[in-house]
């Protein structure tokens, strides 16, 4: 039987299940210098931030007990808005005109300003683990036990997508689906349990499996040039150069559960997970593993890159791209150069 995560039913709980093995003191703040990350925001010990998206200078992060945090300066500072729900919010999508947050019990929330939120109906009570929103209003949400929802009106209304799981495995397992990216021209990519990568070319109406393995995949990153990465269980990493049609395994110096990935079109890759932060500047040919205490004694679940202006005397303003990670204790951290 393929290897899967024991007693875990969502990407967020994957982190918590592994954290149960850590000593209580392992998550305490350390005074040692941080060489790889800089904490820009932290909460109380039991807080958690599960996802983050940044669109240039505007950003949003979501977490436990309906927590929503926003930034207007590319991630340098964050403010918390009143929680619109007591349920955990596990995934978020962001476009200039619309934000969508999803979470427990089939929760879907919409906002046009990132500050006020309203719930919309779905036909599921399944835990929704992530969501993405395309430029033309196509949105796809994914979750536990093979749940897939699609919307053509930027999240106002949703319909379930039925997938024939028996065509993928003889026992008809309904795999948990952990991440989704809505691309251009109707292409949608999903990753999940059993190393599953599902690809749709028609806006999520029909699906084709393009990759399967034993290790679960928890996070996905795809760039406009067709390069991309997916990361998952026990240090499992795969990459693509053709927009997700084909994949190859990449060896990394970690056997941790890897829960988040970000990559640029210039060969930069950042991966985070449980007690892990990996970086590559050459497209995955070589890797650097963090030894900072805030990394090796905690967990991070998602990554996003923001832009901030740099004022330079007697010169035009410069724009710097900065990568942020979110995770345990409600931390939002800047990944240092």
Image (spheres, rainbow, N blue to C red):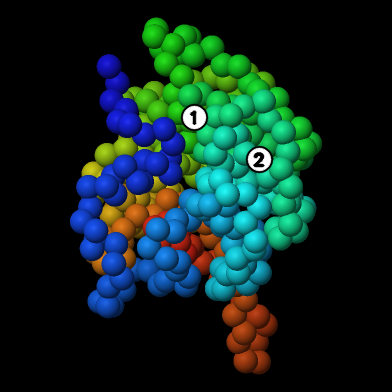
The residue pinned by badge 1 equals 144
Closer to the camera in the image, 312 or 148: 148
- Image quadrant where residue 282 sits: bottom left
Whether residue 241 is visible to the viewer of this picture, yes or no, is no
Query: How dense is the environment of label 1, judged by Cα within 10 Å: few (below 14), some, or many (20 and up)?
Result: many
Residue 120 picture location, percent across and down: 73, 38
Q: Secondary structure at mark 1?
A: helix
Question: Residue furthest toward the bottom?
Answer: 314
The residue shown at (39%, 9%) is 171
- Where 199 falls versus 319 (above or below)? above
The spot of residue 306 in percent (x, y) is: 57, 63
The quadrant in which residue 186 appears is top right
Residue at 68%, 30% in the rendered image:
122
Residue 12 visible to an observer of this rendering: yes
Which of disc 2 and disc 1 is earlier in sequence?
2
Distance between the alpha carbons at the discs numbered 1 and 2: 15 Å
Q: Residue under label 2, please give it.
A: 108
Question: Where residue 320 sits: x, y (%)?
Answer: 56, 71
Quadrant of the rendering where the N terminus is positioned: top left
Q: Residue at x 34, y 55 (%)?
A: 299
Q: Secondary structure at mark 2?
A: strand
Name the one closer to the observer, 72 or 337. Answer: 72
């Amino acid at each position: 039987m393929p290897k899967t995560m024991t007693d875990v039913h969502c990407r967020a709980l994957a982190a918590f299940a592994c954290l149960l093995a850590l000593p209580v003191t392992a998550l305490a703040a350390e005074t040692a210098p941080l060489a790889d990350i800089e904490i820009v925001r932290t909460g109380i010990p039991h807080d958690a931030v599960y996802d983050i998206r940044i669109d240039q200078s505007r950003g949003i992060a979501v977490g436990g007990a309906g927590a929503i945090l926003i930034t207007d300066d590319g991630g340098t500072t964050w403010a918390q808005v009143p929680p619109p729900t007591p349920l955990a919010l596990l995934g978020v999508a962001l476009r200039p005109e619309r934000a969508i947050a999803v979470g427990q019990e089939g929760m879907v929330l919409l906002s046009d300003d990132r500050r006020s939120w309203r719930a919309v109906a779905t036909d599921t009570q399944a835990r929704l683990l992530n969501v993405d929103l395309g430029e033309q209003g196509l949105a796809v949400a994914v979750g536990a036990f093979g749940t897939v929802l699609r919307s053509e009106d930027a999240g106002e209304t949703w319909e379930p997508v039925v997938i024939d799981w028996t065509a993928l495995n003889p026992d008809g397992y309904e795999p948990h689906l952990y991440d989704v990216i809505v691309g251009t021209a109707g292409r949608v990519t999903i990753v999940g349990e059993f190393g599953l990568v599902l690809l749709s070319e028609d806006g999520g109406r029909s699906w084709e499996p393009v990759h399967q393995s034993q290790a679960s995949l928890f996070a996905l990153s795809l760039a406009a040039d067709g390069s991309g990465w997916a990361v998952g269980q026990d240090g499992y990493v795969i990459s693509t150069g053709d927009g997700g049609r084909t994949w190859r395994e990449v060896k990394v110096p970690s056997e941790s559960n890897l829960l988040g990935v970000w990559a640029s079109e210039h060969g930069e890759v950042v991966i985070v997970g449980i007690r892990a932060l990996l970086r590559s500047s050459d497209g995955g040919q070589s890797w650097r593993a963090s030894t900072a205490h805030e990394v090796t004694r905690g967990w991070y679940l998602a990554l996003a890159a923001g832009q901030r202006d740099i004022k330079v005397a007697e010169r035009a303003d410069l724009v710097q791209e900065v990568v942020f990670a979110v995770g345990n204790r409600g931390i939002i951290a800047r990944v240092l150069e």
